[in-house]
């Protein structure tokens, strides 16, 4: 199971390492409402689904579309989780699918927690980071 990786009075971050290249998967959870998002559905969908159920995840945010970050996307979507990715990386998810497009500077509300989306091209053309408002946290994928 995931470990509690970081917390403050408003937000907690859980971390799980999955797959053959040890990808980090994070859950960002509002401590006030229990709402949560999963960042990067990399691999080992059974473990991710268990984690999502336990922590109240409602949505999956993909930092980029490389194969090692999206292998669990089909299972997540089949289980009813909405998957979001940038328009520039959406073609990379053509075979696994996605539901929503993310924009640069978009604010994603997770309960009372706000994640600011920051387009950071380089790793892929559509790479995006998520900065958690009021914290030192940045998820870069």
Image (tube, rainbow, N blue to C red):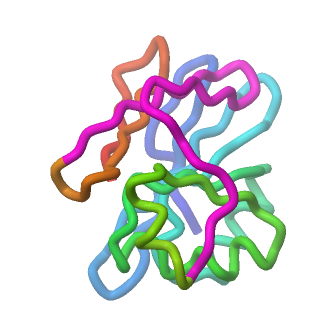
**Number of numbered discs overlaid on the protein picture:** 0
Residue 9: horizontal and vertical position, in percent?
A: 61, 17
Q: Position of residue 70 (x, y in %)?
A: 47, 73
Q: Is residue 28 above or below residue 84?
A: above
Let me know if residue 99 is in the magenta part.
yes
Residue 110 placement: quadrant? top right
Residue 119 lies within the magenta run: yes
Which residue appears farthest toward the left when viewing the image? 122
Q: Give the range drawn in magenta.
A: 96-121
In percent of the image, x 37 and y 79: which residue is there?
67
User: Which of the pair 126/41 is nearer the observer?
Assistant: 126
Q: Residue at image x 16%, y 50%?
A: 122
Q: Which residue is drawn at 66% across and 51% down?
A: 100
Image coordinates for residue 98, horizontal then vertical, percent: 63, 65
In front of the other: 62 or 22:
62
Name the foreground residue: 107 vs 95.
95
* Quarter residue 1 falls in: bottom right
The answer to whether residue 66 is above or below residue 40 is below
In the rendered image, the residue lying farthest to the top is 134
Relative to 7, residue 56 above or below:
below
Q: Residue 131: x percent and y percent? A: 41, 28
């Amino acid at each position: 199971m995931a470990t509690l990786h970081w917390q403050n009075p408003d937000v907690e971050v859980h971390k799980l390492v999955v797959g053959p290249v040890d990808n980090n998967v994070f859950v960002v959870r509002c401590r006030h409402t229990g709402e949560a998002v999963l960042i990067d559905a990399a691999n080992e969908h059974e473990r991710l689904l268990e984690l999502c159920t336990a922590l109240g995840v409602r949505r999956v945010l993909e930092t980029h579309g490389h194969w090692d970050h999206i292998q669990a996307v089909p299972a997540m979507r089949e289980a009813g989780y909405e998957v979001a990715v940038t328009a520039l990386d959406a073609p990379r998810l053509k075979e696994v699918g996605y539901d929503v497009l993310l924009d640069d500077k978009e604010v994603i509300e997770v309960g009372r927690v706000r994640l600011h989306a920051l387009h950071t091209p380089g790793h892929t053309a559509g790479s995006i980071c998520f900065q958690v408002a009021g914290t030192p946290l940045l998820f870069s994928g």
